[in-house]
Image (cartoon, helix red, strand yellow):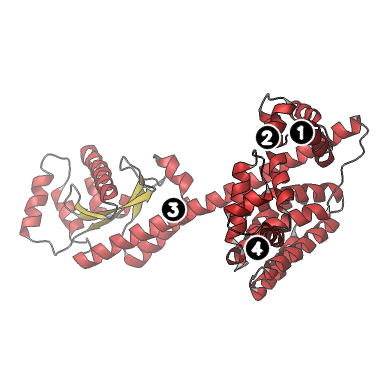
Amino acid sequence: MDKIRLLELADRDVLLKVLEIFNSSTDLNAFIVDLEGNPLVSGKHPLESCSFCKIIRKDPKMKMRCSEAYARAGKLAASISEPYIFRCPAGLIEWAAPILFQGCHLGTIICGQVLMWEPEDFFWIELSMMIKHYDIELAQLIAAAQKLPVISGKKVQAAADLLFIMANHIVKTSIIGMNQQKQLEQQDMLLRAEIKARKILENALKKQNAGPLSFYSLKKEKELLAKIKMGDIPQVLAALQGILTDCLKQYEGNFELLKTRLMELLVIISRTLMEKGGEEKELLELNHFYTRELAALSSPDQILPWFPAIIEQYIKSGRGYQDSQSQVVKQVVDYLHANYHLNLKLDDIARTVHLSPYYLSHLFKEETGYTIVEYLTKVRMEEAKKLLENSLKTVQEIASSTGFNNTSYFSKLFRSREGLTPLQYRQTVVKQ
C-alpha cells in the first residue's frame, strides 16, 4: 500500500484535522508517514517545528537515517498491530502508531521528539559522540535539547494508544462510507440498465404491433410486498427496480406526481412491515422523515440511488420482520430454488418439511402472497430467461431443464408473462 492508496481509503482532511487537534491539545508533534518513512503532508516538513530535529536534519545523512528509522518503526508496529515506542537516531523518544486495514499496513503516525527523563551528563556525552561525524554544531544542539518536553512513560504510552485508536477508527469509518457509496452506485447502475432494457423491449413490441407495455401494476406491487414479508433484501431491491422503472416512465415529465406515487409506496411498505411485527412508532418516524426528504428532491436522477437505499433502511428498521418469517417457508423456498428442474409435487414438497400439503399451502400463501405452484413457476421462468440470455440451448432443451415437460405450454406461458415468445426474447437480448 502506498501514499495514494492510503489517501484513497481514508479521508485525508479528517486525518489531518484530528492530528492538528491532538498536537494543539498535547503540545506534541504527530504526523503521518508512508511505508518508506516519508511524510504524507506536502509543504513544510512536520519536523521543522521541533528546533532539535531541525538542526539534526540539516545533515543529509541524518535526514536519511531519520526516515529509515520511521519506516522500520512503522513496520515493527504493524507486525504487532499496536503502537511501538522507540528511540530515534538522535536519541529522542518517539512512537509509531500503525494504520491498518484488513491486515495491510497503509501508513504510520509518528509522534514524540520528547525525553522521558531530565537530561543528565551521559545524555550530553552520547549526543556529542553521535554527531562527531556529522556537520552539526553541538552547542546549538544542546540548547535545543534543553527545550525538549519531558514526558513520563505512562503518558507516552497513553498518547501512542490514543493515536492508534483514532487513526484506525477514521480509516474504518471511511471504508464503510465508501462501501455504502458503492452500493448506491451499483443500485443506480442496475436501475439504469433496467430502464434501457425496458425501452428496447418497448421498441420490439411496437415492431410486432403488440401494443405498449403496461406501467405500474398492482401485481408488481404485490410481488414487492411479498418479498418484503420474507425479508429477502436482495430480492426486494430487484423487484423495486422494476417498479421504479415503471414509475419513471409513467410519470415522465411530471416529477411532482412521481414523488407523490413513491410517497404512497413508502406508506404501503411501512404498513406491511407493521403487520409483520415492525415497531409502529419507528416506522411512522421513518415515514415522516423520508417523505419530507423525498419532497425536497429536485430531479428524477436523485431518486435512482436514493429510493432503494431508503427501502432497505425501512426493512432493517422493521423489527420483528425476521422473527415473523416462518422457518418452514424459508426451507420450502430454498428447496424450490434448488430443485425447480424436477417434476415436483405438492405432496413431495410438504414431506420435506413434515407438514400436510393443506397446511403448508395456507402457510406459504400467507407468508409470501404466492401459492407454491405460482412461486415454483416464477422460479422456473427466471431460470429459463437466464438460459435464453446466456446459453445456446434450444427452447425445447430449456423447457426440459427448467421443469417444463411440455415445450408448447412453456412457450405459451412465457409469452403470456413476458409479451414475447422465448425466441423473440432471446433475439431482443442478443441485439441489446
Question: Image height check: is 326 above or below 217?
Answer: below
Q: Is residue 244 above or below residue 68?
A: below
Quarter of the picture holding the N terminus:
top left
Mark 2 vs mark 4: in front:
2
Mark seen at residue 174: none
Which percent across, then down, holds residue 260? 82, 61
**Residue at the bottom extreme?**
281
Question: Which residue does the numbered mark 4 point to in the structure image?
Answer: 314
Tell me whether the residue at label 3 lies in contact with that at label 4, contact meaning CB atoms closer than 8 angstroms: no
- Residue 171 is tagged as 3
CA gap, disc 3 and disc 1: 57 Å
Taking the spot 84% from the left edge, 40% from the top edge, the residue there is 416
Amino acid type, callout 1: Asn
The residue sitting at 75% across, 29% down in the picture is 426
Disc 3 or 1, which lies upstream in sequence? Answer: 3
Q: Nearer the viewer, residue 390 or 187?
A: 390
Q: From the viewer's perspective, is 128 left or right of 350?
A: left
Give the CA distance from mark 1 to mark 4. Answer: 42 Å
